Amino acid sequence: QKEVEQDPGPLSVPEGAIVSLNCTYSNSAFQYFMWYRQYSRKGPELLMYTYSSGNKEDGRFTAQVDKSSKYISLFIRDSQPSDSATYLCASNTGGFKTIFGAGTRLFVKA
Amino acid sequence: DVKVTQSSRYLVKRTGEKVFLECVQDMDHENMFWYRQDPGLGLRLIYFSYDVKMKEKGDIPEGYSVSREKKERFSLILESASTNQTSMYLCASSFRTAHNEQFFGPGTRLTVL
């Protein structure tokens, strides 16, 4: 079993839709939960991170972590074609090793 | 503007060749990482370094070695390239204790024939 599981998609939505991206994890020691966005032919870039449980909001993006169910979510409101990318969830115990999910490809159609 | 650069975007090599992938960061980061990215498997850590001349194995170090002679530069070496090392290679860097944020380079797509 992978430590971080993520549905690869692809996920296709119309412009303006609310997008929900999800991951599950198995390691109870994870403390940091990150979402990276990767455009085609580019390296990943950090979108946002959450420490421990709870919600974090940044503009149209909201990250949620539920440690009781080991569930990580990213919500995108009012999705735009420019949001089309691969979204990677990632987790870390506070050490050097970050475990990445396989990524979900998102297409937002104009 | 923070930057991680990788020496090549695309590389084609033959089986058995020695391959060098170079990564340079200009952010004075202590930590540097090499990952490979394969469809369905995500990013997997090959090696990382937390200081000059220091290196630690990641999850898939077999067939690879690394070198960090200067703080800004981290090299990945494939001693004898094999076809199963065809992949996208990503370099990343971070501040010493900022394990929640890594800055990535654009990647090198390596094909081994």
Image (spheres, helix red, strand yellow):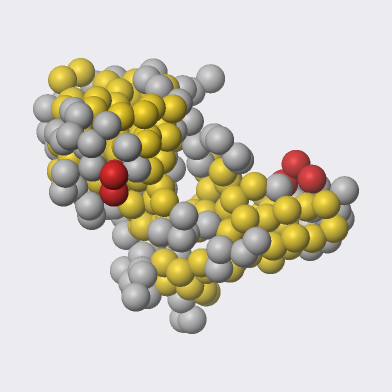
Q: Which of B96 and B13 is in front in this view?
A: B13
Q: In this view, does B7 lie above or below B90?
A: above
Work out whether residue B31 can be spotted: no
Q: Horizontal placement of B3 versus A14: left or right?
A: left
State the image coordinates of residue A101 (x, y, percent, origin top left). Answer: 45, 60
- The residue that appears at 72% across and 46% down in the rendered structure is A83
- The residue that appears at 23% across and 28% down in the rendered structure is B19
Quadrant (top left/top right/bottom left/bottom right) for the C terminus of chain B: top left
Q: In this view, does A103 lie above or below B75?
A: below
Q: Nearer the viewer, residue B40 or A82?
A: B40
- The residue that appears at 83% across and 52% down in the rendered structure is A109
**Res B92 → quadrant:** top left
- The residue that appears at 62% across and 55% down in the rendered structure is A105
What count of labels does the image hold? Answer: 0
Work out whether residue A42 can be spotted: yes
Residue closest to the far bottom:
A69
State the image coordinates of residue B62 (x, y, percent, origin top left). Answer: 16, 48
Q: Horizontal placement of A57 versus A99: left or right?
A: right
**Res A18 → quadrant:** bottom right
Q: Which of A3 and A65 is in front in this view?
A: A3
State the image coordinates of residue A5 (x, y, percent, origin top left). Answer: 46, 69
Q: Horizontal placement of B104 versus B70: left or right?
A: right
Q: Is residue B15 above or below residue A21?
A: above
